[in-house]
Image (cartoon, grey):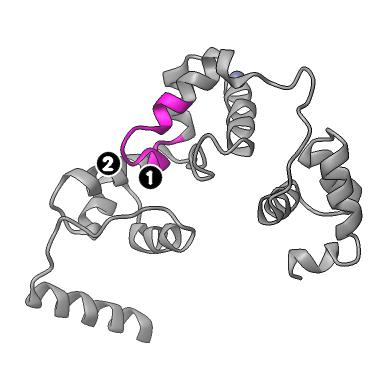
Amino acid sequence: MRRWAILQGKEDNLIKDLKETTLSFKKLGERYGVSRQAVHAFFKRRGIKRLKRPGGHQTEGCRLCQKLIQISKKRHSEFISIQTIVKETGGSASKCISHLRTLRDKGLISVRFGRLHSKRLEEAYAIYFNKRLPISTIGRKVGITNFCSIMRKHRKLGYDVPPPLYVYDGKERSRILSEIHRRKQQ
Ligand SMILES: [Zn+2]
């Protein structure tokens, strides 16, 4: 079901709640039977201004938030795994995740930052960005068999995946195409 469908007919109430209360997106999601993300997307789409939560998290004065913002400004930061982020901040995973959520809600970091949950994938991407190697070779190196399809999925989700440094020549290309063809027929 499309997520807006559930909200249909309740939009006015939700707009009112968003404008006049300081309830979190999570709480509002529970109230309206949709996910926190759906409420957030709705809020963004409508450009609603919210009241400042008294005692809401002050990211400017929070060392963890500032450190997270700093890491998020690195090149290809969307491909840094959450494990590495946690390690770099020196904090606990649950703390990091909750501060990341606040920063995302405030639009201070990319919505995709801190979403990668695989150290192996982080490693694969690091090689991909820096070395002139075929994607299949990178996958083999780090032990990921479907790196190519994961990359495709990430592209679709809006991750900024640059074209490969490795240039496939005509021979290599036709070898790959026939390999794909062969696999499809199996
Ligand atoms: Zn913080």
Residue at (46%, 27%) from the top-left corner? 69
Tag in front: 1 or 2: 2
Q: Magenta residues? A: 69-81
Three-letter code, disc 1: Leu
Q: CA distance from mark 1 to mark 2?
A: 8 Å
Give the camera-side residue of 151 and 60.
60
Residue 113 lies in the magenta-colored region? no
Q: Is residue 186 visible?
A: no
Percent x, y of residue 119: 40, 37
Which residue position is annotated with label 1?
A: 121
- Residue 151 vertical position relative to residue 100 in the rendered view, above or below: below
Label 1, residues with CA under 10 Å away: few <14, some 14-19, many ≥20: many
Q: Is mark 2 within 8 Å of ligand 1?
A: no
- Quadrant for ligand 1 reads top right
Specify the farthest residue to the bottom. 185
Percent x, y of residue 147: 35, 57
Describe residue 182's horizontal placement relative to residue 80 as left or right: left
